Image (tube, grey):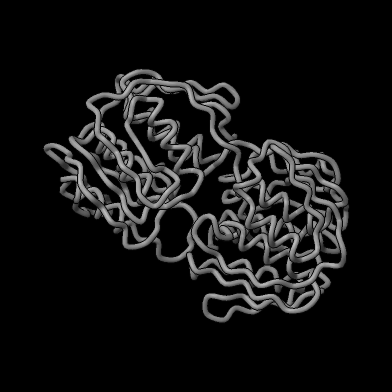
Amino acid sequence: MHKLLIEGGHTLEGSVQISGAKNSAVALIPAAILADSPVVIDNLPAISDVELLAELLREIGGEVEMDQQMMKIHPENMVAMPLPNGRVKKLRASYYLMGAMLGKFKKAVIGLPGGCNLGPRPIDQHIKGFQALGARVTNEQGAIYLRADELYGAKIYLDVVSVGATINIMLAAVRAKGRTVIENAAKEPEIIDVATLLSSMGARIKGAGTNVIRIDGVDQLHGCTHSIIPDRIEAGTYMIMAAAIGQKVRIENIIPTHVESVTAKLREIGTDVEVDDDQIIISRGVAKKGVDIKTLVYPGFPTDLQQPFTSLLTSAEGTSIVTDTIYDARFKHVDELRRMGASVKVEGRSAIVNGKSSLQGANVRASDLRAGAALIIAGLMADGITEVSGLEHVDRGYEHLEEKLSNLGAKIWREELNEEEIEQAKQA
């Protein structure tokens, strides 16, 4: 086990290349189960979630070849092997195995998913969709059992806009009999990415990226080659880092429309943002001033960037209010920021940030993936050295983090945890 050490106060400058989208990758890999011939996925991020999913595909009989950013998946010999525990418990996105295996085999046994602890994130909308398609769903000894004699298209209205449920229902419906209509569907770019892969495999999907998606089921899907879109959350994280302590940072391999809400807020606090076709340049602007942020479903401000932006706001003039309408438990980073000297308090679903705090290096722990990013940003701004533990969360979503930041001029490195720190980590 490792901890990340950051010597604060070093200005960031240069360029950084954004990796493939983590939130696409974790859905695209299970989607390959639906094909009857090899699927090649390119521009994969080198993160632990990708490695875990590759191992899960091998567990059900798939052959998986990996070469840097490319994964070739051979689904021909896959079977509906139950996955009640083990690796499936380690990541939230394991629930996509439900839709893919149900679509391919008409049955699945999947352990309840793990991942970051962000409070209640029920999968009731996923289950509602599977049942509408004709599946019988039971919860037995901590695993979800899905069974169907056949899947039939249906009209499904999602009670809440859910990326996970939208994708999972798409995966189950592409090989169902007849037409499926998903209403109140999520519009995130990752939805379009998954629909593009499925369409390349022979699926018939219309409306991805809108709130109504129509799917006409097909009997078979074939292999294809697909390149993942750039990671808008990683891009947004580096944009926020550059605004926090950058001189001039060029963020490359980016789709600017995917981060428009972040661009708008950075300009509002006084950062210079120059947008090009596939890159964004962040330059030091005028003195930062506080802003209010409310997270919303896409194209609103993403919940995944609420925590990193909170760290940035500790250096802004005045008071800022950050409200998360998606996950009410996504404020566990606040106690750690206060440990570093930030003036932040949580009231209900909002964090109130009193700016111009002088942050000091401290020993802090990442409770989840984006909390880890928030603490790293705070460490970059702080006086002295910040030690961040809980890196298993950070490694789930950021490829080559230390290397990318070091290339920008940060002083950042890893060290092994000592025995006492390992024991503390186990108890956390």
Instruction: Name which quarter of the figure residue 195 lies in.
Output: top left
For the view shown, which residue lies furthest in the left direction?
149
Side of 43 where 317 appears, left or right? right
* Residue located at (54% from left, 28% from top): 227
Whether residue 80 is visible, yes or no, is: no
Q: Residue 24 placed where, x, y %?
A: 49, 40
Would residue 110 be visible to someone looking at this image? Answer: yes
Task: Please give the name of the residue rendered at 88% of the width and 53% of the height, measured from the top-left corner.
Answer: 10
| Residue 259 in the image, given as x and y percentages of width and height | 63, 50
Q: Which quadrant: the C terminus?
A: bottom right
* Relative depth, front residue between 181 and 295: 181
Above/below status of 172 relative to 312: above
Question: x and y percent of residue 327 in the render?
Answer: 48, 66
* In the foreground, 274 or 151: 274
Number of numbered discs on residues: 0
Camera-side residue of 336 and 294 = 294
Left or right side of 188 for 285? right
Residue drawn at the location 60% of the way across and 42% of the way down: 231
Identify the residue at the far bottom of this view.
Answer: 347
Residue 276 location in percent, x, y?
A: 74, 41
Establish if 19 lies above or below 66.
below
Q: Does 174 sit above or below residue 355?
A: above
Tell me: 346 left or right of 118: right
Give the residue displayed 28% in from the left and 56% down from the top: 157
Query: In terms of image quadrants, where is residue 28?
Result: top left
